[in-house]
């Protein structure tokens, strides 16, 4: 394993760039076989990634967790596994529906504290491990106080089956309420060149000593500069900004030009720029291609000077993509 620079999420030390495993299950990004997914994860670990992010809701019936567990079994003690709960609801239990916007309409979650231990035990089985290093409720449950959900996770920490508590897709007020019950190590939020988290959330995280995990740091692949069209079954067909793909690619050209001048891929520039935005942000890009994974992780070693950052910021200020930024309906 090649070492990468590290960052801290609360008391958890991980590589400055992690890996998002969602893309490695069939479905949202089209078809993929398990051998390809496992090879991608092994390449990530070999290149120095020590944080892998999954969820009980990725893939069909726990597929993504099982894939991650198999791929990481030989190096389990060298890698922190983060997973999420609440979207794969047991039969007979209600789904608490909430609006996510755009074509996705509603999703359902259940973070009832009486279910949390069962969620964790199921994820431990799927992952083939004896502990979860970072455990998040995937979304705040509109019908369950966050304090109750966090209290249930705190019991798992005390039992040793969970090492650290995280939150995902929450606002600043929810983070503060949760942290008052039990220390939150990380909050996961969308953060990329075309979308920044709410300032109040960043301020609260700084104040509380909570790390930041950036999901979709490459804009669902757009910021790689390599997405020209989308295949059948690709969920990005439902994302507004991908409906304007050709126009947005043209508008993104100045940023790609800066990457070329610096000898970087657009993805490397997007990740390096993000790493320079905050000392405790850990992006979790996903890719199905080992070569791209290694390239992406190399961005953790890129140092951008003040003049280079200013040039990128100026190009981004002029970058006005068409469409709403994300699947949860927040505009940038």
Image (spheres, helix red, strand yellow):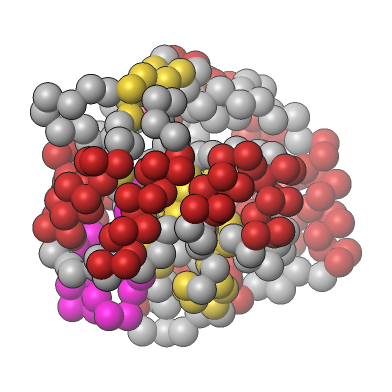
Query: Residue at position x 47%, y 22% from top?
Result: 100
Horizontal side of residue 322 vs 230, given as left or right: right
Q: Considering only vertical position in the picture, is 176 above or below 80?
A: above
Q: Is residue 112 visible?
A: yes
In the rendered view of the protein, which quadrant contains the C terminus? Answer: top right
Horizontal side of residue 168 vs 173, given as left or right: left
Query: Residue at position x 88%, y 64% from top?
Result: 307
Q: Position of residue 255 (x, y in %)?
A: 72, 48
Q: Position of residue 261 (x, y in %)?
A: 74, 62
In the rendered view of the protein, which quadrant contains the N terminus? Answer: bottom left
Query: Residue at position x 17%, y 37% from top?
Result: 60
Q: Position of residue 286 (x, y in %)?
A: 41, 53
Residue 119 falls within the magenta-colored stretch: no
In the image, 259 versus 215, the foreground residue is: 215
Q: Position of residue 106 (x, y in %)?
A: 39, 18
In the image, 316 versus 138, the foreground residue is: 138
Q: Considering only vertical position in the picture, is 312 above or below 250?
A: below
Q: Main secondary structure of the magenta part?
A: helix
Magenta part of the chain: 67-84
What count of labels does the image hold?
0
Q: Considering only vertical position in the picture, is 216 above or below 121?
A: above
Residue 70 falls within the magenta-colored stretch: yes
Q: Is residue 295 visible?
A: no
Horizontal side of residue 153 vs 18, given as left or right: left
Query: Residue at position x 22%, y 36% from top?
Result: 88
Q: Considering only vertical position in the picture, is 237 above or below 193?
A: above
Q: Quarter of the image holding residue 139?
A: top left
In the image, 33 versus 109, the foreground residue is: 109
In the image, 254 versus 200, the foreground residue is: 200
């Amino acid at each position: 394993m090649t070492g990468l620079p590290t960052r801290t999420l609360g008391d958890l030390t991980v590589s400055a760039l992690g890996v998002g495993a969602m893309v490695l299950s069939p479905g949202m990004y089209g078809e993929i076989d398990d051998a390809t997914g496992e090879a991608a994860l092994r390449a990530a670990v070999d290149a120095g990634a020590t944080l892998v992010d999954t969820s009980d809701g990725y893939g069909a019936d726990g597929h993504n967790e099982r894939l991650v567990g198999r791929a990481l079994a030989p190096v389990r003690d060298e890698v922190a596994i983060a997973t999420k709960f609440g979207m794969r609801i047991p039969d007979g239990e209600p789904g608490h529906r909430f609006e996510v916007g755009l074509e996705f309409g509603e999703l359902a979650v259940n973070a009832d504290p009486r279910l949390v231990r069962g969620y964790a035990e199921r994820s431990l089985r799927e992952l083939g491990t004896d502990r979860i290093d970072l455990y998040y409720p995937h979304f705040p449950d509109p019908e369950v106080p966050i304090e109750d959900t966090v209290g249930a996770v705190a019991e798992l920490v005390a039992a040793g089956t969970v090492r650290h508590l995280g939150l995902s897709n929450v606002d600043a007020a929810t983070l503060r309420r949760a942290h008052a019950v039990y220390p939150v190590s990380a909050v996961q939020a969308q953060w990329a060149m075309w979308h920044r988290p709410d300032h109040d959330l960043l301020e609260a995280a700084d104040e509380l000593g909570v790390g930041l995990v950036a999901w979709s740091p490459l804009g669902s692949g757009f910021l790689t500069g390599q997405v020209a069209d989308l295949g059948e079954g690709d969920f990005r067909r439902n994302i507004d900004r991908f409906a304007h793909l050709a126009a947005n690619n043209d508008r993104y050209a100045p940023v790609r030009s800066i990457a070329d001048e610096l000898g970087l891929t657009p993805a490397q520039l997007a990740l390096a720029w993000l790493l320079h935005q905050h000392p405790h942000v850990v992006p979790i890009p996903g890719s199905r291609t080992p070569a791209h994974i290694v390239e992406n992780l190399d961005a953790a070693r890129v140092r951008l000077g003040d003049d280079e950052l200013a040039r990128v910021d100026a190009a981004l200020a002029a970058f006005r993509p068409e469409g709403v930024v994300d699947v949860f309906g927040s505009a940038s």
